[in-house]
Each structure stands twice: as structure tokens, then as C-alpha cells.
Amino acid sequence: MTDFTDSYVGQLRRLVGDRLLLVPGARIVIENAAAEILLQKRSDFDAWGLPGGNAEEGEALDTTIVREIAEEASLKLLEFKPFGFGCDPLIETFTFPNGDRCQYFVLNYFSRSFRGVPRVGDDEATAIKWFSLAALPPMLPNMLKSVEAYVKFSQSGDFQMI
């Protein structure tokens, strides 16, 4: 598994144990020319989700998403824009298999402009694959809500609060 001990969240964990952490982060819907979206099968929950991750100390969320996509999917984002914000504690609060608890506050981005061929870039995922919006695999609930918000945004142009 990835060694998180040097990350900001890893450093906080040493101080607070498994107490609930409030964590800023970013996730992204990447859409290809066939209108498919990129998902990764997460190694922690064995479920599909969007690429993304937590901000590091002193890092802007646009920098976070560029870094996370390079690490997780081996892609370089060329253009990306925010479409929604996820903060509902009912879907953004998780207890991880090791007992750690986090409530996420996530800026959701989308991109249709990237370079590279997606592949698993680290051990946070066991697979990475393009999916049609009409045939999504079982997903983590917060990730599915982000995809649904992306569809609404695509139809209306309205920023989505999730």
C-alpha cells in the first residue's frame, strides 16, 4: 500500500488517531471522445470511483487534482474546470477499513482535455477503465453522486452542490 505517513493526513493521524478528520480534496470526471468517463477500482473499498484525492499542506485544489491524476492515472490534464462541490456529510463521511474516519469537502472538476493513456499509477487502485454513463459499475455513493451532478451540470450549466 501507499505510505501515507508523510502526507498531511498521515501526519494528522499520528496526532489524533482515528478521530474524524475534516479533509479538503478534489475529484474529477474525465470524459473521452466516446463520451465515456474514467473510473478507478479502489483498493481500499474494492469499489469503483473517480480519480482524486486530498490536498497537501499549502496546496491549491487545482494543483491537487493535477498531481492526483498524474499519480493515479498517469495522465496529464491539459484543461479542467470545476462543476460542483461535495460536502453532504451523509455521503462524504467514511470509515476506512483500518478504522480511520474522514468527512470530505470536495471540489469536483471535469476535463475532456488530457494527454496520455490511462493506467494504474499507484497502489490506491487495482484497475482503471473507461465506462459509458449508461453502464456504470457499482460505485462508492459519493462518487456516484459526483457523476450524477456532472450529468446535471452538463445539461444545465449550473454549478452543483452535492
Image (cartoon, rainbow, N blue to C red):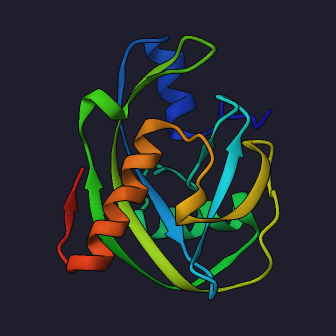
Which quarter of the figure has residue 126? top right
Please identify the quarter of the rendering in which residue 87 is found: top left
Q: How many marks?
A: 0
Q: Which is nearer the eye, 98 or 29? A: 29
**Residue plotted at (46% across, 51% down):** 55
Residue at image position (28%, 27%) is 90
User: Relative to 82, does residue 43 appear above or below in the rendering?
Assistant: above
Residue plotted at (64% across, 57% down): 39
User: Can you say whether 88 is above or below 13 in the image?
Assistant: below
Q: Is residue 60 visible?
A: no
Q: Position of residue 2 (x, y in %)?
A: 76, 37
Residue 115 appears at what percent x and percent y?
Answer: 70, 87
Q: Can residue 97 be seen here? A: yes
Residue 5's x, y, as percent? Answer: 66, 30
In the rendered image of this protein, does residue 33 appear above or below residue 124? Answer: below
Q: Residue at x 28, y 67 (%)?
A: 152
Does residue 115 appear left or right of residue 53 in this picture? right
Left or right of residue 119: residue 146: left
| Residue 10 position within the rendered picture, expressed as x and y whole percent measured from the top left | 57, 30
User: Horizontally, is 128 left or right of 143 in the view?
Assistant: right
Q: Quadrant of the N terminus?
A: top right
Pick the front one: 151 or 18: 151
For residue 88, side relative to residue 66 (left or right): left
Q: From the viewer's side, name the closer residue of 89 and 14.
A: 89
